[in-house]
Image (spheres, rainbow, N blue to C red):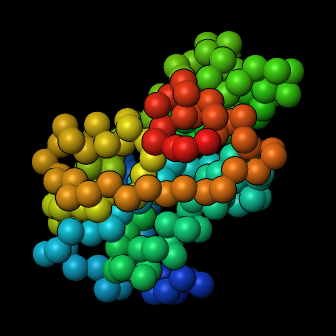
Amino acid sequence: MQRQVEAYLPTDWGNFNIFAYADSADEPSPHLALAHEDMDVTKPVLLRIHSECMTGDVFHSRRCDCGEQLTSALEMVAEHGGAVIYLRQEGRGIGLINKLKAYNLQNQGLNTVDANTHLGFEVDARQYGLAVEIMNDLGIKRIHLLTNNPLKIEAIENSDIEIVSRKPLLIDPKEENHSYLKTKQELMGHLLNI
């Protein structure tokens, strides 16, 4: 994987530089990094590693907290001159079609963990080493990690990036996602207070 292109991206949250990473320039779904124009890599960078969630990020699904987490992260990194790394690993790495199949199983009473394993997948197949590669390319060496996910913390701790602090990214539960968030807390060890 390597940086394919960098471009200027003004957004509702502020001005960013967007970087696309892939093995080749014709990759239709590259991993992305949005670095705020005020990011200073000589200081610890407020950073969010966000895995793609089309249903939450784009369509504002109330089944999860992903879209709200992304919005909050963009607000926070804009305020503090940070960055968001957007990894294209939909549905905890199983892809959008299988994620929608998992939704159907959840509608039948399975939780998000059991739905993934019922379909023959790992509970969470995402890879965060990709984010480490991107941080290294951007010159980011020390971070304030914006996460509730212990797997992200572990991946960074096993790299050459220093976690100066972990910042929680808590979204108030809704009726539609309360059991989903409870499952993330109880079965996946996410650092939540549901």
Residue 143 falls in image quadrant: bottom left
Q: Residue at x 54, y 82 (%)?
A: 13
Decide: is 154 above or below 134: above
Q: Nearer the viewer, residue 18 or 40?
A: 40
Q: Nearer the viewer, residue 170 or 115?
A: 170
Q: Is residue 118 left or right of residue 176?
A: left
Q: In the rendered image, is residue 191 in sight? A: yes
Q: Position of residue 70 (x, y in %)?
A: 56, 62
Residue 19 falls in image quadrant: bottom left
Q: In the rendered image, is residue 2 in sight? A: no
Q: Residue at x 68, y 13 (%)?
A: 118
Q: Quadrant of the C terminus?
A: top right
Q: Position of residue 130 (x, y in %)?
A: 33, 45
Q: Position of residue 106 (x, y in %)?
A: 78, 26
- Residue extending farthest to the front is 193
Q: Residue at x 69, y 50 (%)?
A: 173
Q: Position of residue 82 (x, y in %)?
A: 35, 73
Q: Residue at x 22, y 53 (%)?
A: 163
